[in-house]
């Protein structure tokens, strides 16, 4: 009798079920472990990046971005910075002198920051008073990300269209009680602050040492490109040379560097200042190509070159580069809408250079943000005018609310004060009454015959003030760790995000 095909015995089927259970259990455990690992990786250990490029448009609030987009790319366009995948907003408040940090009993906010307190916030992770650089609200020195990166073996770069001793670049590389202490000479008026220190500090204290002297001697930055040659003297030149910097132009003879010299630079440490003061606005360079100042490189040229000089990987580490489009702020202070927008475009071109590199490199975090808004810049409806131009303020519809203490009348109705509004083209300088009138610009979306400065132009721009404003600023990001910038952060959080990306906060 041939044996019947093996019947499935109860023991066989039990083994099979057990095997299935083990497979299912094993899969579940493996899946769980993977989930746990992924969850923890995203939760407690944000991705690290080989390089970080941190770009700030000084004074670049939401309106500067929107108006720049509409002016150059039309209503349906996008600036390069807006194409970055992560968008968020940054709160920027400072604190008053001698204050504690948020949450402490002596915390005392100052709602509108300047560039110095804002840079100290992201460079050192603390709130400080306006005008403070690399010191806390009680005057104590705090380390900066650029210093930490340098100590950890990263290459470092600092690029600006302002003087490199000005607040945004200086906040990464110096420690002074007052941002006016830039050099070339020490001045008690500019450098001391006895409101904080009680009695004057000795001139040997770093906190009263001019920023230029600190930059020339502390070796924090490998590649320094920008303006401000007039802040440096022969002793600074000697100190820079002793540390091996290639100096483009001449410090002792006050000969600014040129674009040609920048193109030729290939050294590890490069010091190139292209103007004795701030760099020239882009529009002026384009309009006057024969002018010596047209030999200045653009911000995007400086950014590309800085990346090329920094990306050597000789130490096994990458680089940390800060890039500032400073003239957005300076032109906004002057309520110069036309040049403000040109500088937004020049800054956006620098963002494009950083993004190009980051996409090829694959391991570079790019952050684009601002320190604060400048000017209370606004896009108003075509054909309308501002409260500043009005003979009286608008009717206050909630005058019963004691928080609304403006005069709730508009004496002669909704009419212009002709002394304060002379038309649709804005003037020059904060005292020119034309600046109260909207400046009008055509955009690529306008019909071809529409001209700048005409009432047909679609972009109508005004300023509320000649000073900084307190609105949150935008942030855009790309690359490893960028997801942490989605949503709302404070400017001090940028310290942790960059510091963790570089792994220098442990
Ligand atoms: Zn400013």
Image (cartoon, grey):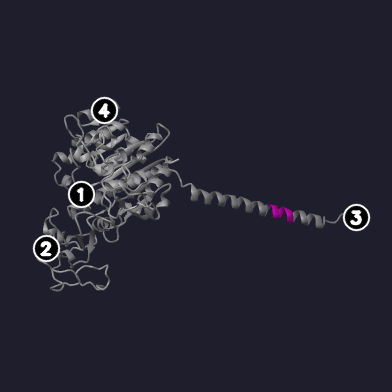
The segment highlighted magenta reads 17-22
Gap in angstroms between the C-alphas marked 2 and 1: 23 Å
Coordinates of residue 442 in the picture (x, y in percent): 19, 60
| Residue drawn at x 49%, y 51% as measured from the top left | 43
Residue identified by numbered label 4 = 239
Residue identified by numbered label 3 = 1
Coordinates of residue 295 in the picture (x, y in percent): 18, 39
Gap in angstroms between the C-alphas marked 4 and 3: 105 Å
Residue identified by numbered label 1 = 330
Quadrant housing the N terminus: bottom right
| Residue drawn at x 19%, y 69% as measured from the top left | 407
Q: Are marks 2 and 1 in contact (CB under 8 Å)?
A: no
Q: Which mark is residue 116?
A: none
Can the viewer see residue 426 in this picture?
Answer: yes
Mark 3: give few (<14), some (14-19) or many (20+) Cα within 10 Å: few
Q: Which mark is residue 420?
A: 2
Mark 4 C-beta closer than 8 Å to ligand 1 = no
Mark 2 C-beta closer than 8 Å to ligand 1 = no
Mark 1: give few (<14), some (14-19) or many (20+) Cα within 10 Å: many
Coordinates of residue 10 in the picture (x, y in percent): 81, 58
Q: Are marks 2 and 4 in contact (CB under 8 Å)?
A: no
Quadrant housing the C terminus: top left
Gap in angstroms between the C-alphas marked 2 and 4: 53 Å
Q: Earlier in the sequence, mark 2 or mark 4?
A: 4
Coordinates of residue 348 in the picture (x, y in percent): 28, 49
Q: Earlier in the sequence, mark 1 or mark 4?
A: 4
Q: Nearer the viewer, mark 1 or mark 4?
A: 4
Task: Answer with left or right where residue 115 lies relative to residue 44.
Answer: left
Q: Secondary structure at mark 3?
A: loop
Q: Earlier in the sequence, mark 2 or mark 1?
A: 1
Q: Nearer the viewer, mark 2 or mark 3?
A: 2
């Amino acid at each position: 009798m041939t044996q019947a095909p093996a019947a499935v015995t109860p023991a066989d089927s039990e083994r099979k079920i057990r095997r299935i259970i083990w497979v299912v259990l094993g899969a579940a455990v493996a899946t769980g472990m993977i989930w746990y690992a992924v969850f923890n990786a995203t939760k407690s250990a944000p991705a690290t990046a080989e390089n970080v490029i941190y770009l700030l448009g000084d004074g670049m609030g939401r309106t500067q971005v929107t108006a720049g987009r509409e002016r150059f790319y039309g209503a349906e366009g996008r600036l390069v910075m807006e194409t970055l995948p992560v968008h968020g907003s940054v709160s920027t408040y400072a604190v008053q002198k001698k204050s504690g940090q948020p949450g402490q009993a002596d915390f005392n906010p100052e709602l509108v920051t300047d560039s110095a307190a804002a840079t100290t916030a992201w460079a050192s992770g603390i709130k400080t008073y306006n005008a403070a650089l690399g010191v806390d609200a009680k005057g104590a020195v705090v380390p900066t990300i650029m210093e930490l990166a340098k100590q950890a073996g990263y290459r470092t770069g600092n690029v600006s269209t302002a003087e490199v001793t000005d607040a945004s670049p200086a906040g990464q590389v110096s420690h002074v009680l007052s941002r006016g202490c830039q050099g070339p000479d020490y001045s008690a008026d500019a450098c001391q602050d006895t409101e904080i220190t009680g009695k004057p500090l000795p001139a040997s204290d770093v906190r009263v040492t001019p920023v230029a002297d600190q930059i020339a001697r502390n070796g924090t930055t490998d590649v320094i490109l920008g303006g401000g040659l007039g802040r440096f003297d022969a002793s600074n030149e000697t100190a820079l040379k002793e540390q091996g910097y290639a100096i483009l132009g001449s410090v002792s003879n006050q000969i600014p560097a040129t674009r040609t010299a920048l193109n030729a630079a290939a050294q590890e440490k490069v010091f190139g200042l292209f103007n004795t003061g701030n760099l020239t606005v882009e529009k002026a360079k384009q309009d006057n190509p024969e002018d010596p100042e047209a030999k200045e490189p653009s911000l995007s040229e400086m950014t590309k070159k800085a990346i090329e000089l920094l990306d050597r990987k000789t130490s096994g580490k990458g680089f940390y580069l800060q890039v500032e489009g400073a003239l957005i702020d300076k032109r906004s202070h002057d309520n110069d809408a036309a040049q403000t927008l040109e500088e937004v475009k020049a800054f956006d071109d620098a963002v494009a250079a950083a993004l190009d590199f980051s996409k090829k490199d694959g391991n570079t975090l790019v952050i684009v943000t601002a320190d604060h808004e400048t000017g209370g810049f606004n896009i108003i409806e075509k054909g309308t005018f501002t409260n500043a131009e009005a003979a009286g303020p608008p009717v206050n519809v909630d005058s019963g609310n004691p928080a609304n203490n403006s005069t709730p009348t508009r004496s002669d109705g909704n009419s212009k004060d002709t002394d304060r509004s002379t038309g649709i083209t804005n003037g020059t300088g904060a005292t020119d009454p034309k600046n109260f009138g909207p400046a009008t610009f055509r955009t690529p979306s306008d019909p071809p015959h529409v001209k700048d400065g005409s009432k047909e132009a679609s972009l109508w721009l005004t300023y509320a003030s000649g000073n900084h404003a307190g609105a949150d600023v935008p942030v855009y990001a790309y690359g490893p760790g960028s997801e942490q910038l989605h949503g709302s952060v404070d400017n001090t959080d940028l310290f942790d995000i960059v510091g963790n990306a570089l792994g220098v906060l442990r």
